[in-house]
């Protein structure tokens, strides 16, 4: 990897790891959502979406805890998990709201529109718009409350070298 790109990747490694975990959770979410929506929960797409998000959230917690934010935190696991699922509950509402609006406010469902239009509207509202809104919220909330920087929480202050330091390494 070229030097500047490598430095950029290192600087934003948490964000990149969070994105990989998010991509994995996105695939889980889509698989469960369409598996349910096209079979047993065909008349209940919002219920299918909620179940899919719950399954993806469990996968996301494990991967984020053990990989993305493994150097952060320091909380008791039960407390951390409770905060994670609380933040994810808000994310669930945020990710489901565009689908609910699409279906029940804009009435983008059969027989008012074609099946193709309904499916495109479901995908765009639930899987694109809802996921993006929830992703931005989750990244911010996970870093702030669930996996905070332990140094920042304890009130530690990083000292910068003095402007007139004689230390050559500073």
Image (cartoon, grey):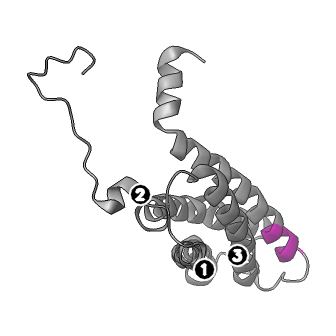
**Residue highlighted by disc 3:** 54
Disc 1 and disc 2 in contact, CB within 8 angstroms: no
Q: Residues within 10 Å of mark 2 (few under 14, many from 20)?
A: some
Indicate which disc, 3 or 1, sits on the residue closer to the N terminus: 3
**Dividing the picture into quarters, in which one does residue 34 lie?**
bottom right
**SS state under label 1:** helix
**Left or right: 25, with 136 as reference point:** right
Q: CA distance from mark 2 to mark 3?
A: 28 Å
Tell us which disc is closer to us: 3 or 1. Answer: 3
Indicate which disc, 1 or 2, sits on the residue closer to the N terminus: 1
Q: Residues within 10 Å of mark 1 (few under 14, many from 20)?
A: some
Residue 18 at x, y percent in the picture: 58, 50
**SS state under label 3:** helix
**Dividing the picture into quarters, in which one does residue 140 lie?**
bottom left
**Dividing the picture into quarters, in which one does residue 150 lie?**
bottom left
**Residue highlighted by disc 1:** 100
> What span is colored magenta in the figure?
32-38
Q: Residue furthest front?
A: 167
**Residue highlighted by disc 2:** 150
């Amino acid at each position: 990897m070229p030097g500047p790109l490598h430095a950029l990747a290192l600087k934003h490694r948490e964000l990149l790891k969070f994105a990989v975990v998010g991509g994995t959770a996105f695939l889980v979410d889509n698989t469960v959502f369409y598996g349910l929506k096209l079979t047993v929960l065909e008349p209940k797409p919002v219920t299918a979406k909620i179940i899919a998000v719950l399954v993806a959230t469990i996968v996301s917690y494990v991967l984020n805890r053990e990989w993305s934010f493994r150097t952060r935190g320091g909380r008791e696991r039960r407390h951390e998990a409770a905060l994670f699922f609380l933040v994810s509950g808000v994310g669930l509402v945020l990710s489901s709201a565009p689908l609910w609006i699409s279906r029940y406010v804009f009435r983008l469902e059969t027989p008012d529109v074609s099946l193709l239009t309904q499916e495109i509207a479901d995908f765009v509202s639930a899987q694109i718009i809802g996921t993006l809104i929830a992703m931005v919220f989750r990244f911010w909330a996970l870093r702030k409350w669930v996996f905070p920087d332990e140094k920042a929480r304890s009130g530690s202050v990083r000292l910068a070298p003095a402007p007139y330091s004689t230390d050559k390494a500073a």
